[in-house]
Image (cartoon, grey):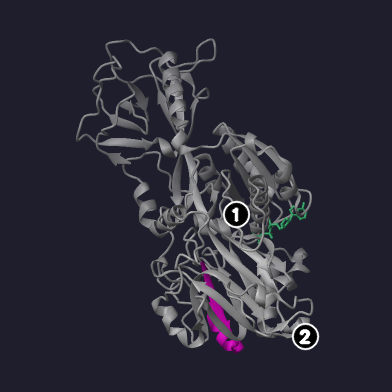
Amino acid sequence: MMATAPEAKVLLYAVLEYENKPAHVYLTSTQLLIENSARPRSHDESLDARPSSGAPHHVIDLREVIAVRAEHRLRAKEKRFRFKSQQKPCLLQEDRLGGTNTFSLFMIKRVSRHRWRHKSSAFVCRDYGTCQIWIDKIQELLKNPEWNRPKRLLVFINPFGGKKKAPKIFDEKVRPLFELAGIYSEVIVTKRQYHARDVIEEYDLQTVDGLICVGGDGTFSELLNGLLDRVNAEAGVSQTFRHKPVSPSLRIGIIPAGSTDAIVYSLVGINDPVTSALQVILGDSIGMDVTALYKKEEFVKYTTTMSGYGYYGDLLKDSETLRWMGPRRYTWCGFKTFLANKAYEGEVSFLLASEDDSHPRDHSICYSGCEKCRRASEKTAALSPARDPQADGDVGATGDSAASSKRASYLLKDGWHRVRGRFSAINLVTISCRCELSPSGMSPSSHLGDGCTDLILIQDCSRLQYLRHLTRIPDLKADQFDFEFIQVYRVKEFSFQPVVEPEDEDEGEGEAREGCGRHKSGHRRLRSASSNSVWNCDGEVVEHPCLYVQVHCQLIKLFARGVEEPQKEDSSLCPTCCPSYDSDK
Ligand SMILES: Nc1ncnc2c1ncn2[C@@H]1O[C@H](COP(=O)(O)OP(=O)(O)OP(=O)(O)O)[C@@H](O)[C@H]1O
């Protein structure tokens, strides 16, 4: 990257050989600044040295450096200073004790949209001593506590998910990078469902800086639930109806190796294991919303992606019996569910997000450093844990598009909206849920950490109508919600009650939940399982149709940067001044 001289204090200065040319190299606490010059100033390596203002510089941002290492592999003959100096430079070679006068910096490079790789740049010093000073100083700076880079990680590998390649992905693509960055990883290959969850329950979590999931969304969900259950238990928070879960200090990283990888796509923009591993190494951190699900008043689990009733519930239930088909089972079951064209009757209740929380059709995209998510996090932090958002009057306002759906809903005294009807699908989408088949996601304007979930109501419609909606989902330019039979809302809480309830419902249920979107509805209690669908909650079937959902703003922190804006990515690609720029993937 080209830049002018930094204002920051120069910690080290030397004339080093960089890309076969002598260069003035300056180290500050956050940057390495390289000023190419055929005329070296001196070799006094004075700390008063300053980069000359106005001269072109190549800047390496230490925040994007993953490691610094003494370079032993370069052959001595190829490396010598090419300029004359007052002090005669020694030949560049390893000394008898294995010391070397060359160090390499390993840093990220952006090779294509959202995809990162790493590259190295070698610096040749006058002697071994200078080289060691530079390595030690850079290593010290990379430990900057503000960057919060992990040193020890507990890694869970699911050998069963996706194309069953998780162990290979970790060993070949991720482990070498972690080793390069000096990260120690304890690896557990899961032997069964809930293995990861059970380990997290018992493990001494004080000894690690984070958890890593090498798998798909289902494996991540296990880690998330295991971690939240553990921290809640330790904090004495019982998971009662509408409890306030504790936010864990440990971060979770996801190395994608699943079938859908919707979380990684929404976090990074691509499901690339190397990119995700590099973001873990750099200590990138982002807060993500978590929704707590309850059937009746009983806590079920925490989710982060999507809960779908009707179309997506039926699709998942069917696909569970066809796991042997691999990821293709979703396409096949999607087709079968589409042909069945079922609709389910029920009542949806929801608490709308406040006006400044935006709307699912506002075309805003959640990019890295998202302003909406930052504001939401500040707002959540400002609310005392004892206060209830409903009591704070944080309810009831409707966005423009929501207003058009007013026909279908009516505001009740307690601030909840209700919509009754027959639905082909009811989807709650908490993050954009991008994936390979749907690059802009199930709800393209959804945010990772705004404390809201997008409610998509698809009324009973014909196959042709539903097909028109489905075919717009993968289309980056089309508005998939622009249909008469679809309403979308940005909500903070939600509940669903089928008109035909399963026989085992409690008699007093409506009364008990009044005030949280529930009311004494006098629902029929019939034995008719097929009258109801199931919920697909983060890819897991929840058989009970009565669901209550509450969103918790940025409850979990992940090792990720967020999707980088295209302009930002382009500006960091520097083919003219950075010779180590590499356009390959
Ligand atoms: N050794 C194992 N044998 C069987 N199941 C396992 C094993 N280890 C983990 N699991 C379970 O496998 C389930 C599916 O894993 P995962 O989500 O990683 O893959 P996927 O379903 O193919 O991907 P995605 O969720 O992204 O579509 C998880 O719920 C996890 O609990």
Residue 580: image quadrant is top left
Q: Quadrant of the N terminus?
A: top left
Relative image position of residue 523 (x, y in whole percent): 69, 85
Relative image position of residue 545 (x, y in whole percent): 70, 75
Local crowd size for mark 2, using a 10 Å CA cut-off: few (<14), some (14–19), many (≥20):
some
Q: Which residue position holds label 1?
A: 245
Residue 365: image quadrant is bottom left
Q: Classify mark 2: helix, strand or loop.
A: loop
Q: Classify mark 1: helix, strand or loop.
A: loop
Indicate whether residue 457 is drawn in magenta: yes
Relative image position of residue 59 (x, y in whole percent): 33, 36
The relative height of residue 187 versus residue 557 in the rendered view (above or below) is above
Q: CA distance from mark 2 to mark 1?
A: 35 Å
Image disc number at residue 563:
none
Residue appearing at x 64%, y 65% in the figure: 293
Is residue 320 left or right of 492 when viewed as pictured?
A: right
Q: Amino acid at mark 1?
A: Pro
Q: Amino acid at mark 2?
A: Leu
Image: magenta residue range: 453-471
Local crowd size for mark 1, using a 10 Å CA cut-off: few (<14), some (14–19), many (≥20):
many
Residue appearing at x 61%, y 75% in the figure: 514
Q: Which residue position holds label 2?
A: 526
Considering depth in this image, is 327 or 541 the residue closer to the camera? 541
The reply to whether residue 585 is visible in this rendering is no
Tell whether circle 1 marks a residue whose Cβ is less than 8 angstroms from ligand 1: no
N-term-proximal mark, 2 vs 1: 1
